[in-house]
Image (cartoon, grey):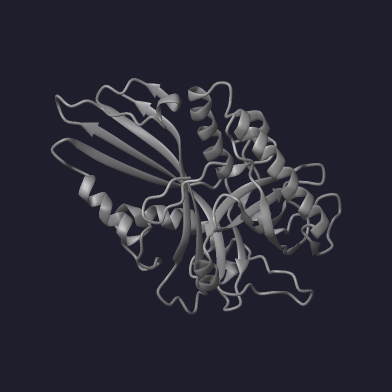
Amino acid sequence: MPIRRFRVTVAAVPLLAALLLTLTGCVTVHGEEVLQPAVKKGEADRVLDRFGKLNNKANEDYDLDVNSRIEAGGLREIDQAGLKVRKEDYPEGNPDYEPLEFSDTNYLIPQQRGWPRWFVADTLTNRNELRWFLVFVKEGPESSWHATHLSLLDDSEAAAIGEFAEDEDGHVRRVPLGASAGLAVAPAELGKTYAAYLKDGSGDDFAPGQHTSERVGSREQYRRTPEYVTQYVDEATPEYPPVALRLADGGALVMFSTRHFVKQTVAEGREVEVPSAAKPLMTGTAKKSLTMERVSQQAVVVPPRDDKGDGIVFYNRLEGVVGAEGS
């Protein structure tokens, strides 16, 4: 899958229709009330292997249907848009595609009741030296596993996140998405809280950094220039539930998605510049303005409610253009 990883500036639905609370694992389907591992290791191996094989086919042929078989949520929306763009440029596919391979894989498997169920594959690839944290979700007993979130972490970031808490059986602990999570911000509210923060940087929920204070500051430079005016709209994505794992210190690693719109209106006599990555996704004609729509996936550590420290810390952010509209 193409990845844009933001560190300085880095590059990366039939959606999950379950309600946010269902990802807590408290839904009972077909009488399955027993607390049990979300997946056995052997099955997790097969899930990752299937994902790799079909991901390679989807990206070699730029095949959206194949991609739909292995991805869902924000990750699919990002990758589907990328496949459309590359298919436009290379209708016959990519003959030079290098197959994605996984190695040194660990699984973060919580115990859950009912459906949907999820687990995280923590793995290396032949793409880079970063660890890929791939979240897989299964909606029901007859459903297939789909990857819904992806985060990329280097060794120092993984170490800074810390140890995951385990239950008495040695499984990682999932975190409920509501207030009972005991976090500074409930996982279900993170998207809304982050979108509100990006408007003006107010509040103390987030630690300073590239994706928080620096991002708000950089926007101020471009809101109004002699060449154009830029408007920003940020939204939560409740249709894409987050996932959260408890850390040993009581906080949580949370992976969540958001949606972002940037509208640029040019001054009289100026022409709108449409990025090549947006042209195959365009609707309308960009005579005076262009609105770019992006989906972003974040990996953050949220501190406990009673020990907020410096606030919520970002460890990774992936973003992709998913739409564009001219006017």
The residue that appears at 60% across and 51% down in the rendered structure is 126
- Between residue 232 and residue 176, name the one nearer to us: 232
Q: Is residue 133 above or below residue 54?
A: below
Whether residue 300 is visible here, answered yes or no, is yes
Whether residue 63 is visible here, answered yes or no, is no
Q: Position of residue 148 (x, y in %)?
A: 62, 47
Query: How many numbered callouts?
Result: 0
- Between residue 93 and residue 250, name the one nearer to us: 93
In the figure, is residue 289 to the left or right of 87? left
Q: Is residue 90 above or below residue 208?
A: above
In the figure, is residue 226 to the left or right of 106? left
Q: Quadrant of the N terminus?
A: top right
Q: Is residue 284 above or below residue 4?
A: above
The residue that appears at 74% across and 47% down in the rendered structure is 49
In the figure, is residue 178 to the left or right of 85? right
- Which residue is farthest right? 31
In the figure, is residue 122 to the left or right of 29? left
Q: Quadrant of residue 96?
A: top right
Q: Quadrant of residue 194?
A: bottom left
Q: Position of residue 17 (x, y in %)?
A: 64, 42
